[in-house]
């Protein structure tokens, strides 16, 4: 009986200690403790350490986690976004068109859509939210998917 209890206890202790081991991999900063308390409860440290996102992308990711019921205050989420942006951020690629921010005219000029296709894309984005990748746009009625695929290297999200 004691052996069985020990076999159950060891994995539990390892899980509880895991975030403590990961602490050394994250740079010191005001929100490091929030990353440990909130983010590392679901995510492996290696996965977070490998991410490079813009501030906007970090905020979207954290907002998505909050809507899934991840516990935390708005202040903690803001602090995490600032911490992750500072330590694991990436600059926006200005050589590409951000289709989540572009106007219909910019979509026409930047990726070669017709004015009607560009309007359909903007209307879809306004109704359903931002795109995460070019493939998300293939479901938009009235937009030529071949044009979207051909322009995928000109887009950012």
Image (cartoon, rainbow, N blue to C red):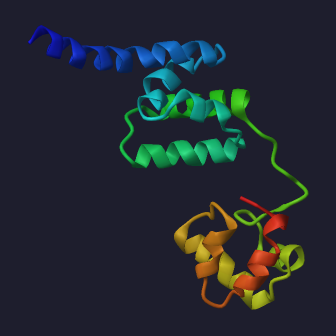
> How many numbered tags mark residues here?
0
Q: Position of residue 109 (x, y in %)?
A: 89, 77
Rendered-image quadrant of the C terminus: bottom right
Residue 98 pos. (x, y %): 77, 61
Left or right: 27 in relation to 35: right
Q: Position of residue 71 (x, y in %)?
A: 37, 34
Question: In the rendered view, would you say 147 is above or below 57?
Answer: below
For residue 102, what is the image quadrant?
bottom right
Lateral position of residue 153 relative to residue 32, left or right: right
Residue 57 image position (x, y, % from top left): 65, 47
On the image, which quarter does residue 87 sit in? top right
Tell which residue pokes out farthest to the top in this image: 2
Placement of the N terminus among the 4 image quadrants = top left
**In which image quadrant can residue 14 be found?**
top left
Q: Residue at x 72, y 87 (%)?
A: 144
User: Height in image: 60 above or below 72?
Assistant: below
- Check the image and report above or below for 62 versus 122: above
Residue extending furthest toward the left: 1
Residue situated in front as seen by the camera: 87 or 56:
87
Residue located at (16% from left, 11% from top): 3
**In the image shown, does 50 or 128 lie closer to the viewer?**
50
Q: Residue at x 71, y 39 (%)?
A: 52
């Amino acid at each position: 009986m004691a052996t069985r209890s020990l076999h159950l206890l060891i994995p539990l202790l390892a899980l509880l200690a895991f975030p403590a081991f990961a602490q050394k991999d994250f740079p010191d900063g005001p929100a490091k403790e929030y990353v440990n308390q909130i983010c590392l409860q679901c995510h492996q440290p290696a996965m977070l350490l490998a991410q490079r996102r813009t501030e906007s992308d970090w905020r979207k990711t954290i907002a998505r986690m909050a809507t899934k019921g991840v516990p935390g205050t708005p202040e903690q989420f803001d602090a995490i976004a600032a911490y992750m942006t500072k330590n694991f951020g990436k600059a926006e690629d200005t050589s590409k068109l951000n289709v989540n921010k572009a106007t219909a005219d910019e979509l026409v000029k930047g990726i070669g859509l017709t004015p009607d296709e560009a309007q359909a894309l903007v209307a879809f984005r306004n109704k359903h939210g931002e795109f995460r990748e070019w493939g998300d746009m293939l479901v938009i009625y009235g937009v030529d998917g071949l044009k979207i695929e051909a322009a995928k290297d000109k887009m950012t999200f």
